[in-house]
Image: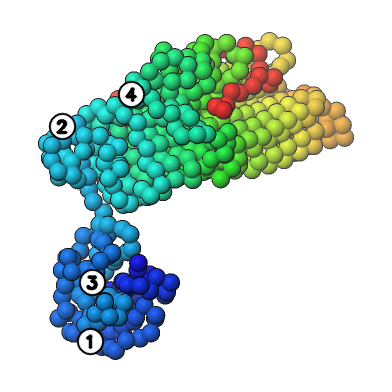
Amino acid sequence: MFCYPRFTVFTQFARSALCVGNHQKQVPTRWIEARFSGEELPKRRCDNRRLAPQTKGQAMKNQITLDQLPSGARRLNPITTAFASNTSPASKGCFLTTMLLAFSVFLPGHAWAATRWVDATALGPAPGTGCGTKAGYTTIQAAVNAAAPGDQINVCPGTYTEQVTIPAGKDNIRLRSTRRWEAVIKAPAVMVPDPFPNLAFTIVRIADAQNVTILGFTITGPGPGGCGTLHYGVRVDSAGSADILGNHITQIRDNPLSGCQNGVAILVGRQADLTTGSARIVGNVIDNYQKNGPTVSNTGSQAEIGHNRVLGIGPTVLIAQNGIQVSGGATAEIEHNFVSGHIYTPQTVVSTGILLFQSGEVLADHNTLTANDVGIYSFLTSGSSTEHNDVRASTFDGIALDSETASVAEHNKVRENDGPGISLYSSQTSTVDHNKVEDNSDSGILLSDSDSNTIGNNEIKHNGTSGPDTTDGIRVDMLSTGNSLHDNHLNDNVTHDCHDDSSGTGTAMTANFWVDNHCETSSPAGLCSDGNSASLETSTTYGWDAAYPWFTSFGDAAGYDWATAYATIDTESLLQLAPNIGIGGIHGKTVSPSP
């Protein structure tokens, strides 16, 4: 057992102490020190007492090879040489080495990070040296079982019909498809359930392992049969953590597709199972799932969800899907995703592009959402922010804040939705600011039974539908009180630019306060003035950046041709879709989160 030396980063060279022997209870602080300018180099024993000094020259004369390391010292990363002091490890209990800082020190219980190769045609000895017969394993799980923390597992092109579990003790393992999307992990015909209490059917599971990477695979169903035969494509639980990068995760569903509430492409934590997880979910194409795309659940779970293409199955009578869901107290940053195709045609409940359902704080920023029942739906969250999104062609609302407190919707472009652009239902102390709201079939901004909110600096035009007086630029119902509506610019809305049905001691005998709004028509009169409805100056960029090179932040992810891969996803055609026609308003309908 080693005593752990204190680590101090210095210039070019380093010294580390590896303590060996029976000094197991003495764990002095980590220690590295180097003064390679000719002066003496200090030495220490495991009891942290200084030994006789030794010069740089004396240290370098005592060169050793790796197989001269004391018993119990194993390799972590490749190094060329190490230098030992004259102190005998057996007699002193410490083994002093000097090495280049560019290489790793020795740590207890760890081996050099190995590269392991997987190919269905493997014939070579483990860990393998390449694809084909040079690979060392025929299944991914065999390589994972053999791997030490920090190992890389290269998976060669082919179909691997298996379930893969990365358990505790496999931290920092990196699973990588050698060619993008050509290593396929496929649900087998007989699925083995996860351990109790989960008992779900999962293709790839990260359970209590930390910092696992899953890069460049196709992970695919369908399940082997009907309802409940495939629950998750990738699941992170038991406080595990993972980077899920650049995969194509598809067909996570029953066979045939059913209305059962399983079939989640990626799950991070789960409130119902009292488990948590964390993940970075970046650069994936996620499609043809049954219930949800990326889903983060339970207090203590968190995720960064960015630069993904998340595509539902489109209008369906079978199941109300959600593109991205954060629920049960989980937190997340949801940025630069393209989310489309979540429409439940019976309209008894609604599908969503992004669903925040009783979540912790969530930032939804610079996403593009098109052709969903509701673009972004926040329900019973507190303090979440919806910013810089481009939301269009929803069956109902573009952005809906339902029973929210202190949430923010700002700098969004909300257009061409069949319901209101932005709606507040039973929400308090929330802010709707600097949004561009135009060409929605219902009101531009709707307040229903909502109090003490601030609606300001929005550009609102060309909203509403001719007919009864039910739509306006800003419409405030009779139950909404104490709201501040200021500095909004409105024009060409049907029926009015500004409309307030409340009664009280506020502006124009309403129960709200209208200040410095610029519009042409109002009901009652006096909610706005002067007709100066010129567009607000803005340099805001809305929605995702499809060309953003996310992969430059993730090591060898940069080695794949992502441009060609993403070119196969026709997001431009999806941006041309007209909204599905909603029957009635969303208020009074419910969302359908994954349990």
Asked if the residue at tag 3 contacts the one at tag 4, i.e. Cβ–Cβ closer than 8 Å, the answer is no
Q: Amino acid at mark 3?
A: Met
* Residue in view at x 36 percent, y 48 percent: 170
N-terminal label among 1 and 2 = 1
Q: Secondary structure at mark 2?
A: loop
Quadrant in the picture for the C terminus:
top right
Residue 99 is labelled as 3
- Residue 207 versus residue 373 in the image, above or below: below
In percent of width and height, residue 531 lies at 68, 30
The mark total stands at 4
For residue 121, the mark is 2
77 sits to left or right of 269: left
Query: Residue 197 at what x, y percent from top left?
Result: 52, 34
Residue under label 1, please give it: 55
Disc 4 packing (10 Å; few <14; some 14–19; many ≥20): some
Which tag, 4 or 3, sits closer to the chain's start? 3
Contact flag, marks 2 and 4 (Cβ < 8 Å): no
Q: Is residue 209 above or below residue 84?
A: above
Which numbered disc, 1 or 4, marks the residue that appears first in the sequence? 1
Q: Nearer the viewer, residue 446 or 145?
A: 145
Residue mark closest to the camera, 4 vs 3? 4
What amino acid type should be assigned to the residue bearing mark 1? Thr
The amino acid type found where label 4 is placed reads Pro
